[in-house]
Image: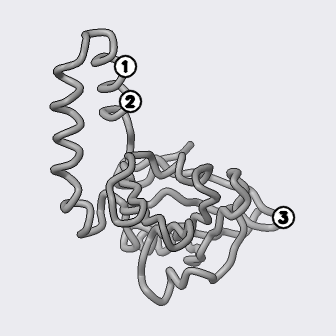
Amino acid sequence: METNDFNQKLNRYELDDKIIYTGFSSYKDAEACAHKKGGELVEVGFKDGNDNPEICNEAGLLEKKLHYFVDAGDEYKFIHSSDPGFRKYADELQKIKAKQQQSPPDERYIANFEIENIEDPIVVIKNDHFESVTSRERSKYLKHAQVYEIGVSLPKS
């Protein structure tokens, strides 16, 4: 794992003739990295329920200037912490935390540890109702999701 100028953790993948970096917190951050390293922006898909990236253009991230998108079918929506809709569900997260604080100490410790230690949180909505909170990395393995991230591609040297 590597970090960029903004101290963000980046994922590094080696494909046949390319090195791909993902994990940017915004499209702008990816653009800055591509410019600095002399790479090009690409859309990277994780579509097999694993951490196996492939370069694609299915979600249109480059055209839309987005850094992250999940397609898990019509009943699920994944809302990234940087998305405007995330604020809408902040109240739900606060209710969950408040409920946990009323639980026995051992349950409270485990539950709080899980929520508070999620980096780059993603809210999962099922049929327009709050379902859970997950991480960006875990979203690759959930609900038969197809996860798309903006990446920076560099030639292998």
Q: Is residue 132 depicted above or below 149 in this figure?
A: above
Q: Is residue 5 depicted above or below 43 in this figure?
A: above
Say if residue 151 shows up in the picture: no
Mark 2 surroundings: few (<14), some (14-19) or many (≥20) residues within 10 A: few
In front of the other: 19 or 131: 131
Disc 1 marks which residue? Answer: 110
Name which of mark 3 and mark 1 comes first in the sequence: 3
Picture quadrant of residue 79: bottom left
| Residue 64 tag number | none
Disc 3 marks which residue? Answer: 16
Quadrant location of the C terminus in the rendered image? bottom right
Q: Position of residue 130 (x, y in %)?
A: 32, 54
- Secondary structure of residue under mark 2: helix
Residue 26 located left or right of residue 53: left
Residue 25 located left or right of residue 97: right
In front of the other: 22 or 89: 89
Looking at the image, do the residues carrying marks 2 and 1 touch, with CB atoms under 8 Å apart? Answer: yes
| Residue 114 tag number | 2
Amino acid under disc 3: Asp
Amino acid under disc 2: Glu
